[in-house]
Each structure stands twice: as structure tokens, then as C-alpha cells.
Image (cartoon, rainbow, N blue to C red):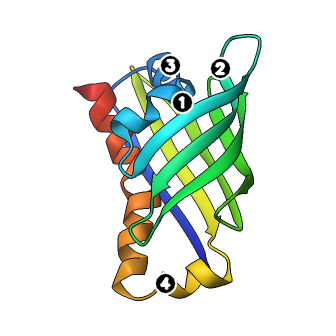
């Protein structure tokens, strides 16, 4: 396996604007997203949000560093793509939908290409653990952080 695609979805007992406020504050993400060790803005937009960031993540077989470009389409979408780093490619997004009555659906998507060498280490049980870490847990982590 050299690629991993994953998604997770959760319904959150909070209004869209409250959920977006946390999603767009990417600098807080290492506090509540498992495996995300660091996120350091290198460039910011006119609102002070990180647009180009150095990201450190533990993917079980290795700690990786990447430079990621973020795009904000609030309050319903945050997306990112790797510009350079230890992985061959990374693309992802948060998509939020207002369900009414103070509820929001949050969907997390990620596509990772580990490249040939790192991809050879990501096999079998390790693949399942990495998929859960990179994608499966994300929406639940957001729900827990917002609802507590």
C-alpha cells in the first residue's frame, strides 16, 4: 500500500458557526487531533489564519514533517494540500453542514500517498492503525472537543 484514503463523519450538538470556529483555528488542532504533534504557521492571511504551515505528525511507523497549504471557505469547508514534505502527497478537508436546531454534520476526508519507501512499511495491521489515526477518529475527536 502506498496510498490511504479515509473519511469520518459525526453529528455534533453545536451550531455551524461554533464548529467552524474550532475547525478554522488550525493552530489548536494538535491539542485535540491524535497523532498531530505540531502545526507552525509560516504564512498567514489577512485574518491572521495560517495559510502555509509546517506540520509534524506521528504516523506510527515514522514521525513525518510536511509543508501544507490551507484554504478557508468558511463556514463550511477547510481544505489543505501538501506542498512538500516527507510524504509524496496529502490532500484533505473538513466539510460542515448545518442540520438545523443547533446541530452540525462534520465530515473529514484525507488522501495520503506515502510514496514507495514509506508505503512499504505501511502494511497489514499497521495500515488499519494508520487509517484510524489519520481519518477514522477525526470527526469523533471534533465532536468530543466541541461537546465537552
Proximity of marks 1 and 2: CB atoms separated by less than 8 Å? yes
Label 3 and label 2: CA atoms lie apart by 11 Å
129, above or below 145, in the image: below
SS class, disc 4: helix
Check residue 49 in the rendering and tell me which mark sits there, or answer none: 2
Residue 77 appears in view = yes
Measuring from the top left, give residue 106's x and y in whole percent: 48, 40
Mark 3, secondary structure of its residue: helix
Q: Residue at x 63, y 63 (%)?
A: 111
Tell which of 60 and 138 is nearer to you: 60
Label whose residue precedes the other's in the sequence (4 or 2): 2
What residue is shown with label 1?
Answer: 26
Q: Quadrant of residue 29?
A: top left
Whether pointer 4 and pointer 2 mark residues with C-beta atoms closer than 8 Å, the reply is no
Nearest to the observer: residue 49 or residue 7: 49
Q: Please give the name of the residue rendered at 46% of the width and 24% of the height, measured from the top-left corner.
A: 22
Q: Which residue is mark 3?
A: 21
| Foreground tag (1 vs 4) | 4
Which quarter of the rendering shows the C terminus? top left
Label placed on residue 55? none
Left or right placement of residue 116 versus residue 129 in this view: right
Considering only order in the chain, which callout, 2 or 3, is on the residue closer to the N terminus? 3
Q: Is residue 36 left or right of residue 55?
A: left
Which tag, 1 or 2, sits closer to the chain's start?
1
Dot 1 or dot 3: first in sequence order is: 3
Numbered disc 2: secondary structure: loop
Amino acid at each position: 500500500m502506498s496510498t490511504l484514503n479515509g473519511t469520518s463523519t459525526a453529528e455534533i450538538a453545536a451550531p455551524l458557526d461554533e464548529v467552524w470556529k474550532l475547525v478554522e483555528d488550525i493552530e489548536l488542532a494538535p491539542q485535540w487531533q491524535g497523532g498531530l504533534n505540531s502545526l507552525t504557521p509560516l504564512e498567514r492571511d489577512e485574518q491572521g489564519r495560517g495559510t502555509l504551515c509546517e506540520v509534524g505528525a506521528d504516523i506510527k511507523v515514522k514521525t513525518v514533517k510536511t509543508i501544507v497549504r490551507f484554504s478557508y471557505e468558511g463556514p463550511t469547508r477547510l481544505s489543505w494540500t501538501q506542498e512538500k514534505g516527507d510524504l509524496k502527497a496529502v490532500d484533505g478537508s473538513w466539510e460542515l453542514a448545518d442540520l438545523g436546531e443547533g446541530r452540525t454534520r462534520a465530515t473529514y476526508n484525507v488522501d495520503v500517498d506515502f510514496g514507495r519507501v514509506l508505503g512499504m512499511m505501511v502494511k497489514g495491521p499497521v495500515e488499519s492503525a494508520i487509517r484510524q489515526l489519520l481519518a477514522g477518529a477525526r470527526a469523533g475527536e471534533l465532536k468530543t472537543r466541541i461537546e465537552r
